Amino acid sequence: MKQLICAATALAMGATMATAEVKVGMITTLSGGGAGLGIDVRDGFMLAMKQSGRDDIEVVIEDDQRKPDIAVQLADKMIQSEKVDVLTGIIWSNLAMAVVPAATAQGKFYLSPNAGPSPLAGKGCHPNYFNVAWQNDSLHNGGGAYANKAGYKNTFIMAPNYPAGTDALNGYKALYEGEVAAEVYTKLGQTDYASEIAQIRASGADSVYFFLPGGMGISFLKQYAESGVDIPVVGPAFSFDQGILQAVGEAALGVKNTSQWNKDIDNAANAAFVESFQAEYGRLPSLYASQGFDTANLLISAVDKADVSDADAFRAALKEADFASVRGDFKFGTNNHPIHDVYIREVIKEGDVFTNKIIDTVLEDHGDPYAAECKM
């Protein structure tokens, strides 16, 4: 599946042209169990492109089907045949690990709107790799900090067995001060959690922390609610985001989750984004949509300042992050990953819509521990 989208509209007629065309290759998940995440990233990105009125940035979009081999094939085609300057879009960390190192080694820029595996933040960092979302551990660090604040002493922790899952549970344990009742890794894409729920029931845990993005989180939360196990659950935003909540329904009400973004963050850019996204697509934006939107606006800010063919200048322009982020102040750390606040959200219902509200800030100006390993 391929979409070729030139950001050219009537509004762009009077726009100031940059000195060079920029071609962007977006590889993201548009089919299968994780499609909602990729669709939201794409829609947020393309909304920013439409609002910019640019005709000097071209975006080619491909579906990776959540398969590493397909993602690698698409990246090779985009670099060799499409001659893209910048790559973006990947949702899953195992796909990012398959694509990003080879792309940056060929001199391409990669702007991540989601996946933030620890190797790419640490020893495998690269000057052409910028993560506009978070390093994988970040929201899970917030989960550990929240567990301490909530007084949890014995947590059952669970995540899928892939790079982001490992980062998730390591990130939680990095700040969590209590005991771990059990550490369980599930199959990526799993939909039946009867065995894991039985383990939770028997564990003696006083809380559950889980990272199960997309359809995995929907399945687990529904089954957990039906099981009658009365142990509080906490997770990152990936398991409680806007699209997921509508599928989970009442079972998610009151659950606490960590995020670096929410629709009620009080700044002008965020208010305008939430309103315009809902007007454009007929739904509330998700965390993923906000990340796609910020990624596009970071790119646009760099194109305004430098020619992409001048790698040093373009890299410096990206590093400046001179754009109005939906999360407020935005800055990169030394390893080109965000330094940002992490919030605790609570799932609520507004009319007929399940959504989140921020109830506290658990980490301020939070970076990641892998920056110390990044030599650039």
Image (cartoon, grey):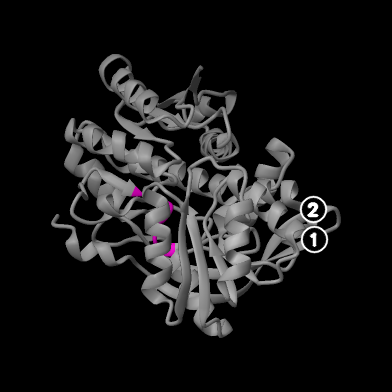
Q: Residue furthest top?
A: 81
Q: Position of residue 241 (x, y in %)?
A: 62, 53
Q: Position of residue 82 (x, y in %)?
A: 33, 17
Residue annotated with mark 1: 349
Q: Which mark is residue 362?
A: none
Element under disc 2: strand
Left or right of 45 on screen, residue 80: left
Residue span colored magenta: 131-138
Element under disc 1: strand
Q: Give the Cα distance between marks 1 and 2.
A: 6 Å
Which quarter of the image is occupied by the C terminus?
bottom left
Residue for point 38% across, 44% down: 93
Q: Mark 1 is on which residue type?
A: Lys
Q: Give the overall secondary structure of the magenta segment.
A: loop
Left or right of 65 on screen, residue 277: right
Q: Position of residue 106 (x, y in %)?
A: 18, 30
Residue annotated with mark 2: 353
Q: Nearer the viewer, residue 263 or 27?
A: 27
Residue 123 vertical position relative to residue 23 in the rendered view, above or below = below
Q: Mark 2 is on which residue type?
A: Val
Q: Is residue 257 visible?
A: no
